[in-house]
Image (tube, helix red, strand yellow):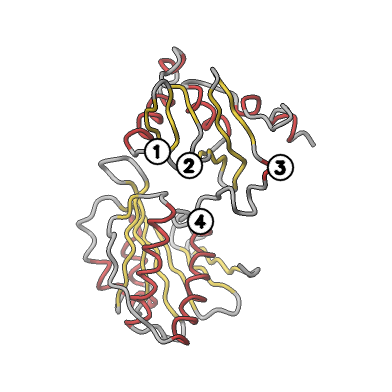
């Protein structure tokens, strides 16, 4: 993505409350706020326009992040209909300041954004089927630019659920930066990522938890959640990662592999045996 200047306006001076966001040389605008300020968000004149909206929160059944992506010719009227959904705690929507977003445009954007959310795999996507829309080539090009700008602003507004996890073939993971975590003859590979630490598909983890998991049960709970989600599967005397998965820190990643508390700065090493701690010494 090209560099950009972001204009973030805190309506009540609080970054957690109602705020708007714009990018330089872009006709779009974002409005975002917590559910506790629902009336204030929808009182904005921007909510009377057509656009794309996001409802984000936590799925009550799995405890995972959840997202609903929708389109509307009048944001205010459509979002009011979602008050019966209890999972969401934040509403964010995007409109065009020049009012050039047609029904076909927003349907196209909705379909593309749903695909991104499902591919990223960071959240439960509440509505998996979008209306979609075919556009002329020129309009499609314009909407791809609009989509790019949406993806630039979403993380700034606290929504990283559409950000794809970095993989080995991306610039984020050159072979020289790969790290290894080994225990009991098992081996896992991973690397530092923008959001923490990524363990790669095919990595191995111990089958049973350490006694320390009784003292720090979050490790056991996280491993069970990964099993329930199909990320970790049993394979003879070990567990295998079925896909790339990102953790908040190297220690959290190492703890899942070790089956208990672990220091990620010493558990992860490069091909020459240097620990992550040694590699990151300035």
Disc 2 vs disc 4: Cβ atoms closer than 8 Å?
Answer: no
Disc 3 vs disc 1: Cβ atoms closer than 8 Å?
Answer: no
Disc 2 vs disc 1: Cβ atoms closer than 8 Å?
Answer: yes
**Mark sitting on residue 231:** 1
Disc 3 vs disc 4: Cβ atoms closer than 8 Å?
Answer: no
Q: Is residue 186 left or right of residue 89?
A: right
Residue marked by disc 3: 176
Q: Quadrant of residue 78?
A: bottom left
Task: Name the element at disc 3.
Answer: helix
Task: Name the element at disc 2.
Answer: strand
Disc 4 crowd, CA 10 A, few/some/many (<14, 14-19, 20+):
few
State the CA–CA distance, disc 2 to disc 4. 29 Å
Mark 2 vs mark 3: in front = 3
In this rendering, is residue 21 above or below 178?
below
Residue 164 point in image, percent of width and height: 49, 54
Task: Name the element at disc 4.
Answer: loop
**Mark sitting on residue 245:** 2
Q: Where, quadrant-wise, is the N terminus in this rendering?
A: bottom right
Residue 10 point in image, percent of width and height: 51, 63
Residue at image point 44% right, 25% down: 219
Task: Name the element at disc 1.
Answer: loop
Mark 2 vs mark 4: in front = 2
Residue at image point 38% right, 73% down: 44
Q: Quadrant of residue 139?
A: bottom left
Q: Where, quadrant-wise, is the C terminus in this rendering?
A: top right
**Mark sitting on residue 15:** 4
**Mark sitting on residue 269:** none
Q: Earlier in the sequence, mark 2 or mark 1?
A: 1
**Frontmost residue, 134 versus 187:** 187
Residue at image point 52% right, 70% down: 148
Disc 3 crowd, CA 10 A, few/some/many (<14, 14-19, 20+):
few
């Amino acid at each position: 993505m090209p560099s950009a200047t972001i204009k973030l306006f805190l309506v009540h001076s609080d970054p957690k409350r109602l705020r708007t966001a714009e990018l330089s040389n872009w006709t779009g605008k974002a409005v975002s706020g917590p559910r506790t300020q629902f009336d204030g968000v929808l009182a904005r004149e921007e909510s009377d326009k057509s656009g794309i909206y996001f409802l984000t929160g936590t799925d009550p059944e799995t405890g995972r992040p959840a997202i609903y992506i929708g389109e509307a010719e009048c944001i205010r009227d459509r979002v009011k209909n979602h008050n019966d959904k209890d999972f969401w705690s934040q509403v964010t929507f995007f409109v065009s300041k020049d009012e050039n977003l047609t029904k076909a445009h927003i349907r196209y954007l909705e379909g593309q954004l749903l695909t991104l959310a499902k591919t990223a795999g960071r959240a439960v996507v509440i509505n998996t089927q979008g209306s979609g829309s075919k556009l002329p080539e020129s309009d499609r090009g314009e909407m791809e630019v609009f989509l790019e700008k949406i993806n630039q602003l979403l993380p700034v507004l606290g929504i990283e659920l559409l950000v794809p996890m970095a993989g080995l073939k991306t610039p984020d993971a050159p072979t020289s930066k790969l790290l290894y975590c080994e225990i009991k003859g098992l081996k896992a590979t991973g690397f530092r990522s923008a959001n923490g630490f990524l363990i790669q598909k095919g990595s191995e983890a111990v089958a049973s938890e350490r006694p320390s998991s009784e003292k720090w049960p979050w490790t056991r709970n996280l491993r069970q959640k990964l099993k329930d989600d199909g990320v970790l599967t049993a394979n003879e005397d070990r567990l295998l990662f079925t896909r790339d998965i990102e953790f908040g820190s190297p220690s959290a990643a190492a703890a899942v592999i070790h089956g208990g508390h672990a220091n990620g700065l010493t558990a992860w090493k490069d091909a020459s045996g240097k620990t992550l701690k040694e590699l990151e010494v300035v």
